[in-house]
């Protein structure tokens, strides 16, 4: 009936008002229904494209990449137009309004609805057309502190001429490999960094990357440092796979300078993934080494530059800068100049001596320092100038207190470079005086490292992360020499051990307090070794020689040992003699092949257990017998699937647990007939690092009750970056079953860094209400992301 009435009206309008007749076609039920159906189809298509884009956004965010602004704007536009269209199409009552007592559609309303439907379709089409992106995201390349202006750099004439020559050589298209050489401590690294800054500032290259090679030649470390600067993330595990990925990435850079600092021998650039020469003319490599032979013969460097000693006035200028202008005073000036002269123009000697005497107005101390520097050196080190040795030894003698000296030597002869390692070894050796809590020890470790940096005995790490540090190789050589003389420490690489009298002399071995072996490729270890005074044993196998094992009786006659580190070794079954070490405080089995570690149940005094990077599949119940354990590190244990219940809860003294990404997360899940431990067993912890992929496994009302330091990531959308010094950080990706009101976050006022993803309006309201309840909080950074709201973390500081 309605269609008949509408036909009659249409014929009338056709005669009286032709333009209106054209619109009536849109009012017919069939026509209107078609428009409405087309609109719904377009909405569904746009929703599918939105889901696809959001999935790509989530994947990029997991990789730590930044989302393109036009993508974020498109998602916001898509959300708005979808919301408008859904509201329109869901109003069925409006679409069915009639007049003439229901016999005829309401033409006025139908006209308005028809126009709105067409407008919405046009808007959706425009949004869909705008949703074709070349790139969803881009890599976030961290600010390179290396390339920032160095306020401490001295533009000495002797250095500026070399800097200019190197710059000219970099502009030469026929030169692709350059080198800087000179004795240790002469300033090669400083000059190389200044080359990097000038190359960047003068736009000679699109990218400049820097990596320290060192004697050990850690290829993975070199690859990682270059990749970090380029924003490249490795998925490959093998060095060769990473090399291919890095090679392809570097080839995309039209002009790039790769600086490789501290080369000791032949470094295979191809194996590392660095294209050079005809393989990529736009990639130039700058090397630093101690000898010309290393550069020209082993690395085929085309153009090499020698760095020599500072001139006398240059040396004095640097000395004054490090010691303070007060040395110009009449009383000190003469002896201070003599002290500076004894440093013989060697920057590392000048810096360490001047820093050790800084702000010291005692003429007697200055004269004593001068006398020490004038004495013949008692140690003859192959790679260290006598002047450098005496200068660094003087700085060591000036360190305040035995604690600081012992920490300096430990860092030197073990070559550790992180607060985490210093904490493990320092606690095990009892070097932190009067400290028996991990939190207190961690603070002490940071304080001591800060003091050593202030004395120029340690350096900032190239990454500038506060939890890492480095030591000049000349300073390290001197530290090893001092430790060998004063503490009977034996530290060597496999190459140095071969044919070494001290290693084959049983009477000498008996006196060792520490044995440190790096990069061991063959089994140098005897069946048993008598070391009654040994406190620290550190053996790091060559990373490509994982077959290295420990003889079963090896530990029988070293029962006083307090710290053991075994890295990259094949330890499917730990030697039974390990259980005899009743004084062992720290055991680190880093990146080892492990199967049976039940023997550790006998280590009743163990306080630190590190299984990081091992391939252990099951944490044995015997771990629960280590009732004095304070720190457990299970990071990067990719194969770990079973933690039996009631093991962690028995560790009543446990303060710190590290379980970052790529490790165990099957809480309360049954695996091989065993129901795994519950997160409730962690309630007593003080520090926690944890990532859980499935938000539904998270118990209600658990976290942030006793924790003082934590990094907790819940859900699969979060990328992982190891923090320098943890703040109280909590990240959670919600789903349809879990909302904020379920009590996942307690003690909100303690959180410093809060990230909330997939929020709904009810979650935001709940969060705001809870924030009002706790009053002033410690919240510093807030990131909120939901289907209809996004808050940039840079804009969400509170």
Image (cartoon, grey):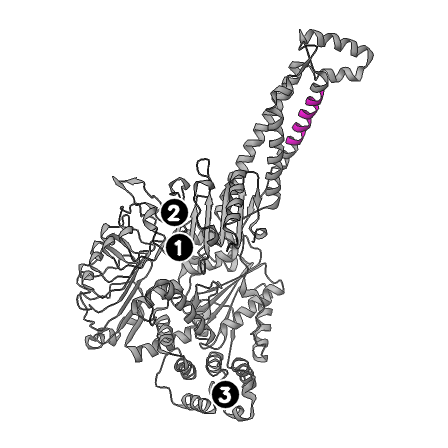
Q: Number of marks in the image?
A: 3
User: What residue would you read off at disc 1?
Assistant: 707
Is 413 on the left or on the right of 201, as rendered?
A: left
Instruction: Kindly check if marks 3 and 1 are in contact, taking CB atoms under 8 A apart as contact.
Output: no
State the residue position of label 3: 361
Q: Which type of secondary structure does the marked residue at label 2 adopt?
A: loop
User: In this rendering, would 434 be left or right of 210?
Assistant: left
Which numbered mark, 3 or 1, is in the foreground of this view? 1
Gap between marks 1 and 2 measured at Cα: 11 Å
| Distance from the alpha carbon under mark 3 to that under mark 1 | 47 Å
Residue with the mark numbered 2 = 702
Given this view, does label 3 or label 2 mark the residue nearer the observer? 2
Residue 65, x across and y down, in percent: 52, 49
Residue at 63 percent across and 21 percent down: it is 36
Q: Secondary structure at mark 1?
A: loop
Q: Residues within 10 Å of mark 1 (few under 14, many from 20)?
A: some
Q: Earlier in the sequence, mark 1 or mark 2?
A: 2
Residue located 50% across and 43% down the image: 757
Q: Nearer the viewer, residue 340 or 666?
A: 666
Q: Quadrant where the N terminus lies?
A: top right
Whether residue 140 is situated above or below residue 364 in the rendered picture: above
Q: Residues within 10 Å of mark 3 (few under 14, many from 20)?
A: some
Taking 98 as reference, is 65 left or right?
left
Residue at the image point whose x is 37% and y is 68% from the top: 415
Whole-percent x, y for residue 466 in the image: 46, 64
Residue 192, label in figure: none
How far apart marks 3 and 2 lie (CA) works out to 57 Å
């Amino acid at each position: 009936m309605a269609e008949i009435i509408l036909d009659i009206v249409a014929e009338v309008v056709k005669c009286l008002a032709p333009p209106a007749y054209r619109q009536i076609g849109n009012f017919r039920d069939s026509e209107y229904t078609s428009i409405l159906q087309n609109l719904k189809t377009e909405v569904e298509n746009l929703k599918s494209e939105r889901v696809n884009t959001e999935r790509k956004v989530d994947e990029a965010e997991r990789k730590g990449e930044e989302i393109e602004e036009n993508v974020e704007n498109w998602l916001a536009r898509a959300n708005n137009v979808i919301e408008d269209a859904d509201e329109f199409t869901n109003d069925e009552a409006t679409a069915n309004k009639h007049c003439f007592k229901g016999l005829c559609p309401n033409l006025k309303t139908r006209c308005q609805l028809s126009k709105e439907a067409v407008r919405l379709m046009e808007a959706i089409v425009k949004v869909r057309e705008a949703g074709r992106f070349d790139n969803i995201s881009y890599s976030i390349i961290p600010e390179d502190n290396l390339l920032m202006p160095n306020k401490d750099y001295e533009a000495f004439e002797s250095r500026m001429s070399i800097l200019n020559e190197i710059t000219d050589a970099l502009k030469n298209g026929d030169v692709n490999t350059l080198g800087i050489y000179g004795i240790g401590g002469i300033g090669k690294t400083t000059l190389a960094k200044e080359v990097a800054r000038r190359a960047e500032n003068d736009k000679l290259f699109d990218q400049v990357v820097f990596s320290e090679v060192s004697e050990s030649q850690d290829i993975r470390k070199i690859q990682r440092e270059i990749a970090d600067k380029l924003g490249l993330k490795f998925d490959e595990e093998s060095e060769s796979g990473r090399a291919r990925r890095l090679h392809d990435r570097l080839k995309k850079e039209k002009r790039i300078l790769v600086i490789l600092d501290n080369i000791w021998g032949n470094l295979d650039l191809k194996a590392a993934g660095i294209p050079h020469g005809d393989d990529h003319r736009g990639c130039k490599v700058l090397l630093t080494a101690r000898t010309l032979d290393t550069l020209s013969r082993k690395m085929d460097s085309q153009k090499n530059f020698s760095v020599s000693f500072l001139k006398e006035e240059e040396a004095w200028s640097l000395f004054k800068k490090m010691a303070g202008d007060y040395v110009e005073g009449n009383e000190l000036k003469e002896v201070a100049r003599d002290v500076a002269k004894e440093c013989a123009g060697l920057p590392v000697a000048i810096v360490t001596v001047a820093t050790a005497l800084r702000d010291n107005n005692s003429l007697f101390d200055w004269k004593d320092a001068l006398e020490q520097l004038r004495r013949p050196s008692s140690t003859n080190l192959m790679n260290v100038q006598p002047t450098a040795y005496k200068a660094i030894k003087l700085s060591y003698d000036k360190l305040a207190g035995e604690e600081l000296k012992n920490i300096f030597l430990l860092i030197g002869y073990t070559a550790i470079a992180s607060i985490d390692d210093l904490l493990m070894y320092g606690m095990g050796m009892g070097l932190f005086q009067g400290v028996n809590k991990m939190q207190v020890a961690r603070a002490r470790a940071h304080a001591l490292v800060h003091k050593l940096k202030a004395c120029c005995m340690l350096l900032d790490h190239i990454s500038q992360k506060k939890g890492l540090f480095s030591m000049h190789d000349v300073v390290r050589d001197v530290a090893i020499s001092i430790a060998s003389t004063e503490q009977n420490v034996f530290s060597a690489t496999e190459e140095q051990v071969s044919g070494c009298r001290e290693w084959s002399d049983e009477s000498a071995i008996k006196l060792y307090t520490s044995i440190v072996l790096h990069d061991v490729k063959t089994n140098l270890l005897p069946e048993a070794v008598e070391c009654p005074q040994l406190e620290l044993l550190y053996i790091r196998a060559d990373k490509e020689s994982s077959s290295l094992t420990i003889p079963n009786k090896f530990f029988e006659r070293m029962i006083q040992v307090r710290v053991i580190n075994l890295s990259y070794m094949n330890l499917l079954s730990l030697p039974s003699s390990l259980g005899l070490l009743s004084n062992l405080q720290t055991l680190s089995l880093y990146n080892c092949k492990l199967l049976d570690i039940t023997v550790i149940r006998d280590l009743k005094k163990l306080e630190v257990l590190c299984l990081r990077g091992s391939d252990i599949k099951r944490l044995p119940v015997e771990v629960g017998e280590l009732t004095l354990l304070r720190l457990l590190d299970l990071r990067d244990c990719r194969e770990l699937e079973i933690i039996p219940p009631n093991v962690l809860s028995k560790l009543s003294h446990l303060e710190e647990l590290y379980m970052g990404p790529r490790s165990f997360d099957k809480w309360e899940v049954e695996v091989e007939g065993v129901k795994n431990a519950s997160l409730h067993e962690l309630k007593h912890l003080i520090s926690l690092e944890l990532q859980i992929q499935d938000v539904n496994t998270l118990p209600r009302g658990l976290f942030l009750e006793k924790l003082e330091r934590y990094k907790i990531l819940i859900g699969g959308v979060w990328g992982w970056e190891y923090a320098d010094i943890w703040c109280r950080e909590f990240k959670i990706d919600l789903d349809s079953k879990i909302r904020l009101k379920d009590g996942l976050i307690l003690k909100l006022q303690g959180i410093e860094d809060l990230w909330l993803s997939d929020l709904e309006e009810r979650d935001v309201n709940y969060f705001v209400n809870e924030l009002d309840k706790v009053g002033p909080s410690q919240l510093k950074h807030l990131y909120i992301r939901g289907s209809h709201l996004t808050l940039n973390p840079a804009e969400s500081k509170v």
